[in-house]
Image (cartoon, rainbow, N blue to C red):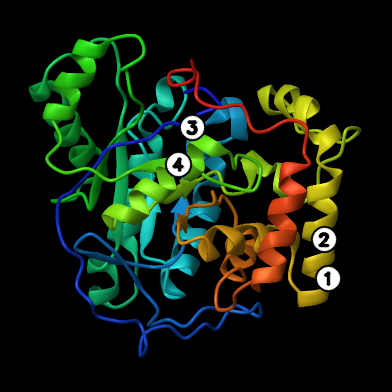
């Protein structure tokens, strides 16, 4: 799994979530941050999902995110907190998890769903969006169907809410692309979309999706962590992310300063403002979570909206950044 995944992704909707709300089943006992209304849902094709989902890339990835199996209990608490507070969309992939832990994200997600102690209707309304890697040996529609079956087995569930092609092979293996498309029965677009990756390509795709009534899932809304405000040129994360951050963060002052200014004025945090921008642009962001603290902070991005002037301020500051997020190597020409 490369760290610069920013490709349009095909999705199939495999079942419809019911419209039951969480009004009577979300005590919000453990949160003190601003929350969104538990009955607030948005339409994604036939599905009703929370206006923000949570990503699980870190659940099993040792190389980029430092995962250790001792973290599983914290991840389960994080999952429970999210579901209890109205989040019903979780994003995963069959390639999430490094080495022998390949598929660990799906396994953990399935386990946490089965062991969730809340109301059954809440558990039944959880929507899983998983992605099937375009491995070189997946050359036929049937192989993609088998990949879907394997994901179902790992999660021990009967149906997947949204199935996605993890990346396109059109640039380097067009015949494989056609075969994999034939393995999907309906399409939505999913792209990296954040203040750090905003550009002509992203906006063109979003405009096309808007015209077709397709809602974008925007992954990496915090730019792999660069838009959290906690990293500087002298304080970088370890591993591959540090190399990427060192190339981009030195030019992010205009954007980060605007995020901090708005966050202070709104009594929010920098990540909450960055996520809320994605929501205000009509997308469903899926920030990654690997701790209760992160889940609590991300939930605080809901229940309010940036003003039009604040949106323009952030977008103007983003354009002043000399470097954008590196895009997907499979897609970039």
Nearer to the camera, 283 or 94: 283
Identity of the residue drawn at 42% across and 81% down: 38
SS state under label 3: loop
In front of the other: label 3 or label 4? 4
In front of the other: label 1 or label 4? 4
Label 3, label 1: how far apart the Cα atoms are: 30 Å
Percent x, y of residue 94: 32, 32
Percent x, y of residue 40: 40, 79
- Mark nearer the N terminus (4 vs 2): 4
- Mark nearer the N terminus (3 vs 4): 3
Q: Are marks 3 and 1 in contact (CB under 8 Å)?
A: no
Q: Which residue bears the numbered disc 1?
A: 264
Q: Residue furthest left?
A: 142
User: Relative to residue 202, is residue 147 depicted above or below?
Assistant: above
Nearer to the camera, 70 or 43: 43
Identity of the residue drawn at 14% across and 57% down: 15
Label 4, label 2: how far apart the Cα atoms are: 28 Å
SS state under label 2: helix
Q: Which residue bears the numbered disc 2?
A: 260
Nearer to the camera, 39 or 8: 8
Tag shown at residue 204? 4
- Mark nearer the N terminus (3 vs 1): 3
SS state under label 1: helix
Label 1, label 4: how far apart the Cα atoms are: 32 Å
């Amino acid at each position: 799994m490369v760290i610069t995944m920013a490709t349009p992704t095909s999705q199939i909707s495999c079942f419809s979530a019911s419209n039951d709300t969480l009004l009577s089943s979300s005590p919000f006992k453990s949160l003190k941050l601003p929350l969104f209304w538990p009955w607030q849902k948005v339409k994604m094709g036939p599905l009703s999902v929370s206006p923000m989902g949570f990503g699980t890339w870190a659940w099993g990835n040792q190389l980029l995110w430092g995962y250790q199996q001792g973290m599983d209990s914290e991840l389960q608490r994080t999952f429970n907190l999210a579901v209890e507070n109205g989040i019903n969309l979780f994003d995963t992939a069959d390639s999430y998890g490094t080495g022998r832990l390949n598929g660990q994200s799906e396994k953990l997600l399935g386990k946490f769903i089965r062991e969730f102690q809340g109301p059954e209707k809440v558990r039944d309304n959880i929507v899983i969006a998983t992605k099937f890697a375009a491995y070189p040996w997946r050359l036929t529609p049937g192989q993609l169907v088998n990949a879907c079956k394997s994901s179902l087995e790992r999660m021990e569930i009967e149906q997947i809410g949204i199935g996605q092609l993890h990346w396109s092979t059109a640039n380097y293996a067009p015949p494989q692309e056609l075969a994999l498309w034939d393995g999907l029965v309906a399409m939505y677009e999913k792209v990296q979309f954040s203040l750090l990756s905003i550009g002509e390509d992203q906006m063109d795709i979003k405009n096309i999706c808007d015209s077709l009534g397709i809602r974008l899932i925007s992954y990496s809304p915090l730019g792999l962590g660069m838009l959290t405000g906690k990293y500087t040129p002298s304080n970088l994360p370890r591993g591959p992310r540090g190399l990427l951050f060192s190339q981009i963060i030195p030019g992010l002052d205009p954007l980060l300063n605007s995020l901090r200014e708005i966050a202070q004025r709104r009594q929010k945090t920098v990540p909450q403002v960055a996520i809320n921008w994605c929501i205000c642009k009509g997308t469903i962001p899926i920030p990654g979570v690997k701790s209760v603290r992160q889940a609590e902070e991300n939930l605080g991005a809901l229940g309010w909206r940036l003003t039009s002037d604040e949106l323009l301020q952030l977008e103007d500051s983003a354009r002043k950044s000399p470097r954008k997020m590196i895009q997907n190597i499979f897609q970039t020409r």
